[in-house]
Amino acid sequence: MKKYLLAVGILTSGFLGLNTAEASEVEKDKLEVDPLIENLKTEHPDWTITLVTSDEATKIKEEVKNSPVLRGPAPPLTALYIDQIASQVGTSSEYTEDLRTQTSHAVSGKVSIGVMQVGYGSENQWLDDERITYQNRDYKINVASIDSNNDRIVDGFYYTVTFNSDLKISSGTSALYKFNCTSSSYPWNTIERTLNIPHL
């Protein structure tokens, strides 16, 4: 047991030591086929959906903000909702409505959550009090740009986060997943969505 705790301590200190520059490399390693994003592509075959790194997403936002074609600020945040939940218990994927505040069943094993952001904004994610970041290897985050009308201007972004619920949520308890986003332009509104996730 002591050896196990020591190993966990060494690994944890290694993960915490990652700086911002290294985060991009960590993220590039994680870019792969994402089932929730593939589901989104199937559901919306007329959209252009492109998996990108967080650096690429930031660049897209800056380009749109400074684009002479738009003659104005980046499109404001107009909607944010939890779109899909997938877990290893019960249904393989579960489609939600904006008002869903809890998973339909207790989970175990791998859990994936997909969040749709319409418009531009700065986003943050948490599981209870733990901030979900690219540097934290307990979480796999993917982001896709969305062009819903094929005018070659990104209309929003789709975020997915995947984690092992057995490591993050104690048996018989629940954790609160939270995603909030503040608009990059007027009216500077903030939208927040939460999802309670009970564990078996």
Image (tube, grey):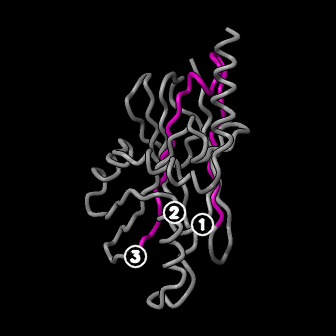
User: Mark 1–mark 3 contact, CB under 8 Å?
Assistant: no
Please state if 43 lies on the left or on the right of 71 as rendered. Answer: left
Quick check: is 180 in the magenta stretch?
yes
Identify whether 183 is placed above or below 127.
below
Give the mark, 1 or 3, whose residue is nearer the N terminus.
Answer: 1
Quick check: is 142 in the magenta stretch?
no
The nearer-to-camera label among 2 and 1 is: 2
Q: How many angstroms separate mark 1 from mark 3 (CA)?
A: 15 Å
Residue 89 rendering spot, x and y as whole percentages: 44, 22
Q: Which residues are magenta?
A: 153-182
Any mark on residue 153, and which?
A: 3
Quarter occupied by the N terminus:
top right
Q: How many angstroms separate mark 2 from mark 1 (CA)?
A: 14 Å
Mark 1, residue position: 121
Residue type at mark 2: give it: Asp
Toward the right, the furthest residue is 129
Q: Secondary structure at mark 3?
A: loop
The local crowd at label 2, few if under 14, some if 14 to 19, many if 20 or more residues have their Cα within 10 Å, is: few
Residue 81 rendering spot, x and y as whole percentages: 53, 52
Any mark on residue 55, and which?
A: 2
Residue type at mark 1: give it: Gly
The local crowd at label 1, few if under 14, some if 14 to 19, many if 20 or more residues have their Cα within 10 Å, is: many
Which of the 4 image quarters holds residue 185? bottom right
Q: How many angstroms separate mark 3 from mark 2 (CA)?
A: 17 Å
